[in-house]
Amino acid sequence: MDDWKPATALIVGAGSGLSASIARAFAADGMKVTLAARDVAKLNTLCRDIGAEAFSCDASELQQVETLFASLDTGPNGAPDVVVYNPSYRVRGPLIELKPEDVARTLMVTAFGGFLVGQQAVRRMTEKGRGVMVFTGASASVKGYAQSAPFAMGKFALRGLAQSMAREFQPRGIHIAHVNIDGGIRNQGRGYVEKPGQPDSFLDPDAIAATYLHLVRQQRSAWTFELEVRPWLESF
Amino acid sequence: MDDWKPATALIVGAGSGLSASIARAFAADGMKVTLAARDVAKLNTLCRDIGAEAFSCDASELQQVETLFASLDTGPNGAPDVVVYNPSYRVRGPLIELKPEDVARTLMVTAFGGFLVGQQAVRRMTEKGRGVMVFTGASASVKGYAQSAPFAMGKFALRGLAQSMAREFQPRGIHIAHVNIDGGIRNQGRGYVEKPGQPDSFLDPDAIAATYLHLVRQQRSAWTFELEVRPWLESF
Amino acid sequence: MDDWKPATALIVGAGSGLSASIARAFAADGMKVTLAARDVAKLNTLCRDIGAEAFSCDASELQQVETLFASLDTGPNGAPDVVVYNPSYRVRGPLIELKPEDVARTLMVTAFGGFLVGQQAVRRMTEKGRGVMVFTGASASVKGYAQSAPFAMGKFALRGLAQSMAREFQPRGIHIAHVNIDGGIRNQGRGYVEKPGQPDSFLDPDAIAATYLHLVRQQRSAWTFELEVRPWLESF
Amino acid sequence: MDDWKPATALIVGAGSGLSASIARAFAADGMKVTLAARDVAKLNTLCRDIGAEAFSCDASELQQVETLFASLDTGPNGAPDVVVYNPSYRVRGPLIELKPEDVARTLMVTAFGGFLVGQQAVRRMTEKGRGVMVFTGASASVKGYAQSAPFAMGKFALRGLAQSMAREFQPRGIHIAHVNIDGGIRNQGRGYVEKPGQPDSFLDPDAIAATYLHLVRQQRSAWTFELEVRPWLESF
């Protein structure tokens, strides 16, 4: 049985609680971790804690994504074995009132950035013959909610990208996975604070990270392309 | 039982055999039809045959879409009762070789244009309390094929838009439908010419149009949101 | 373009408002209709109105299904060009309290009967090289609701049967379709009576029947395998 | 964060390589494991290796399932914290030639047995307020293949059961999961032997078991209901 083990990881869209938890879980498992985010100032503590390096990058901008990967190529860790794509943007409200430029931006950050990062990632992974790319989805990846068309468009598109990449690159040794996060992440949104008597009703980012780590460590004879994570009290 | 019957239709992305067939089917059913396409020169015969008017419009450009609908508002037919969104763009090939600008264009034409047209359409339909909006999907709407990520991204996104609009606007009297065309349309692609002994192995555009017309005429107690059309010999 | 037109139809599970509406729609389109139900006494008026013959048949019993089809073979209409399978049975309640024999019965009536009828139907249709088989699904065909596991099991199984039959028999000229009825049918369940101000909030059986007729009349280059019908006010 | 940890497990349908791998993985994680199968003679070595007890049980027979659980209740391990349902039965071939009794048996073993075992399991788990129930699915759980309708019927039905149980019991503390095994398991079917140059082209049962163990250990704020496992070289 194949016993490949990833040594380096890049987490794009770092900063939120989920990205930090993934970074800590990967580092605890022995990976060298790099973080990329538009705003890196807030990553100082995390970087120090786990010995990670942080790069400033707007994932929807080709030039910045190219620069990010070029920097990794020549850095101490080299091209990453694992890449996680987390960024998203969303606007909500009555469809009639949405501003078209906000819809375009949602598509660019949520889906097009996934393509830019994914393309750079698999270029390098195919050379090595191994790698893992995980895309972070949401409830909106498989269900278009009323008054939330832009996010559905972006997350559906990202899922289409992930499926297409899985079919193209899994036979070349690169594990592609898509995780539907079906619920609010604790403390990461307005109101995502648990009520008395409802423990664990929001997703704990460390619990999600445990599943990301499991995906990354799956043996190639039994890869999971897609799964969802959902609090026990969440209706679906 | 409600007996509302649409009187006017706008078909965006006209020009292909499918759009022409839909236009003829709608006109034969008594609707006044308007066609919109980037290149209207090729629509002359069709317009004359069915008494339709044609407008030049790039559906991925906000300004042009606004101008199109404004022209209809003040024209003889008024705002359309039925709108069909057909445009798509695609690039194929190894993901590593795709040009990012082509991927962005695929998203813009295939999905963002659907938002622009859909937004203008429902603004007017909600005022009337009735209307029908049909989005044209493809096999790629529900399955991301290898070496075809951009089209999957665009068509997945369009489906997410359609679902979200259905949940927001159906309770307001507007029928939203999404049609997955799962196969090649006769004579509309390289190689889409039937082989001896395999009649009807590509979709006949008139046969597809019959189903579009059925959707448009469904009574509101039993609306179909989604269906696929597929040749009998197509594997799936 | 192929212009085959079905001449005879068998509706199994007749008696409910939906079956009666389908029978009337098919008869109005020129088909000779046969009805099969466990209790045929209630079908007298319908039979007289549309000139149909009724047979008593428990669709979950092999012998009775064989007898039904043998009777048709030697009758004036011959083997049916179109067969519709409607029967279902269900029990609800806390899973812990369900009686296993009721669960088994739900599987037998809702799914196994579909196999028995489908097998007899396609045996005859493959000889003719044409035919249509429509299976009636429900919301439970694609979503397993709490406290309703038996119905989900039966309707999921029926959908699996329909998919498998589509892949085996469509290339042999037999159109297989599955209709998800996502909502209550007017006057056919407790509480399925519309409230003031909510017209058409339950499915009108005649409206559903119009879509069954459309499926049956689709040209083979553009067959629909699956669609749902849903009231405009239904959430999903 | 909740830190419940299962102490006992029951694996139904034991005997195959997958069940043995799951049993070993659970035992290695510290669980007391019980095995149930129609034929227990072949389980001797496994039982000795991991200190497990084996019970003879036909999971499609109510009486036998009741007896199994009653035996566990009064045994040293008590009612199981984790239950895995693996049994399935299948017949293949042209639908026209299938024997109806084989189709009924497929439904009974593959799906009805899942209900019988699931009902007994959750009766006990709801009393404790915690538990995990995993159902083993297949490619046929979500796709009905030609000439394989019975297996599709059984596996679709089992998935419907799992969904319904998830919606009813997850808010009561019981994790329900459904695993689609999308490929052949190494050495467990005719031809499931790897060809030179195609390592890991069949699922390694130990690799699958690692994912079952992960599911069983997920924290309740981030439960996965469904995932698939698939070899890297498998097309889908």
Image (tube, coloured by chain):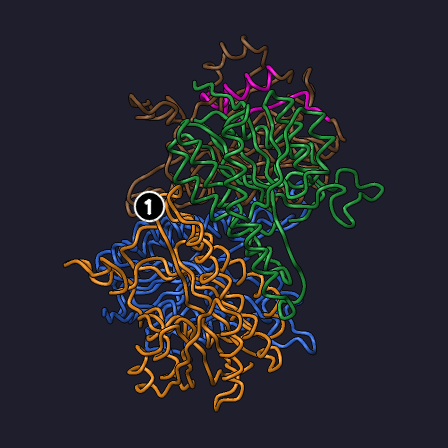
Chain colours: A blue, B brown, C green, D orange
Residue sitting farthest toward the left: D196
Residue at the extreme right of the image, as rendered = C196
| Residue occupying image coordinates x 31% and y 72% | D206
Can you tell which quarter of the image residue C153 is in? Answer: bottom right
> Residue B160, located in which quarter of the rendered image?
top right
Q: Which residue is mark 1?
A: B146
x 59%, y 39%: residue:
C12
Q: Is residue A136 magenta?
A: no
Bounds of the magenta segment: B4-28
Q: Is residue B16 magenta?
A: yes
- Left or right of residue D39: residue B41: right
Percent across and percent down for residue B223 are 64, 36
Q: Is residue A56 visible?
A: no
Vertically, is B51 above or below A166?
A: above
The chain letter for the residue carrying disc 1 is: B
Please provide percent x and percent y for residue C196.
Answer: 85, 42
Query: Residue sitting at 69 percent across and 29 percent down?
Result: C47
- Using the rendered image of the protein, determine whether residue D172 is visible from the camera's viewpoint: yes
Q: Please state the horizontal and vertical placement of residue B165, each as a whole percent of the image.
A: 62, 42
